[in-house]
Image: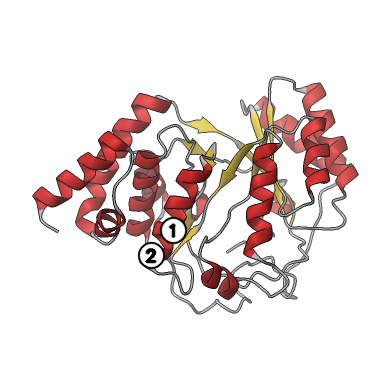
Amino acid sequence: MSLQSRNSHIDLLLTTADAPDPVIAGLLSDPDATEELSAAAHQVRIARKGSHTKQRGLIEITNRCLNNCLYCGIRAANRTLERYTLSHNEIVAAAKYAYSQGMRTFVLQGGENPAVTDTMVTDVVRELKSTMPDAAVTLSLGERPYDIYRTWREAGADRYLLRHETYNPAHYRSLHPAAMNRENRLRCLEDLTALGYRVGTGFLVGSPGQQLSHIIEDLRFIQLLNPGMIGIGPFIPAANTPFADHKAGDVGLTLRCVAILRLMNPDADIPATTALATLGGPDAQQKALCGGANVVMPKFTPPEARELYHLY
């Protein structure tokens, strides 16, 4: 792509928050566009979200999961992983420590674990909101029935993170077991939105079988959903999974996705994910913050459990 074309395409995104699919495809596939896209995205981030980087305290409450997503390190079929589930008191203690360190949002994340009952989550949310009323509670606990989402919302949960992973139906089937389906994932996002959660979604960049057209479908879906938060990161192969030997996602492509997401969704919160730092080092995470991202999520999982939460 010529410099003139690249600049005109970025200007189109900058001024309209949209562009035709071929334009977006051209920018995604052009490594030379990374720096200019990031500069434009940073301009929008400063104008719409300010220069302050938000911090959200991540507490990984369990690494047990009923599901067998083919890319995930905590999938049920991984028999090599030592499993844990934090108790009610351990979760609350971790949140209170995070609060003492300045966190005003807690992200309770974990696999779909029957031991983490609906009632337990409800009770934890209520205690967090009653003892630290100025803090927001974000849940990231997978696919649940509408009534459970409603109960947690009524208990005080403010936000819910649920990556759609990929909008393309065939690609979704290639990443998940037959027991899971894309339609239910999308139903969950609709339910969460209807219940008034501030919803977060996202996808993996470079996941096995992903094509450029799939990424464009993801970008279009996210823009239509208009989520409060968009979390993306490069695919990192996890040990003891069917994709353990697959190549990792590309950091440069991920940075271009972050920038384009900011240009297309100027008011969303976009984290500079830990996956970027894992694959590309702290410099990659900093590049994301200078290229449209505005959130970091430091971990407050208790030390004895932190090393056991291996999504990748």
In screen coordinates, is 6 left or right of 47?
A: left
User: What amino acid is labelled 2 in the image?
Assistant: Ser
**What is the distance, in whole Å, between disc 2 and disc 1 at their CAs?**
6 Å
In screen coordinates, is 42 left or right of 188?
A: left
* Residue 263 in the image, given as x and y percentages of width and height: 34, 40
Q: Quadrant of residue 16?
A: top left
Q: Which residue is mark 2?
A: 213
Q: Is residue 51 visible?
A: no
In screen coordinates, is 56 left or right of 302?
A: left
Q: Residue at x 69, y 32 (%)?
A: 158
* Residue 258 in the image, given as x and y percentages of width and height: 39, 47
* Residue 17 in the image, given as x and y percentages of width and height: 33, 39
Near mark 2 (Cα within 10 A), the count class, few <14, some 14-19 or many ≥20, is some
Residue reaching furthest to the right: 119
Q: Residue at x 56, y 75 (%)?
A: 174
Q: Which residue is mark 1?
A: 217
Q: Establish if 182 lies above or below 85.
A: below
Q: Which mark is residue 239?
A: none
Q: Residue at x 23, y 41 (%)?
A: 12
Tell me the SS state at disc 1: helix
Q: Quadrant of residue 247?
A: bottom left
Q: Is residue 110 visible?
A: yes
Q: Are marks 2 and 1 in contact (CB under 8 Å)?
A: yes
User: What amino acid is labelled 1 in the image?
Assistant: Glu
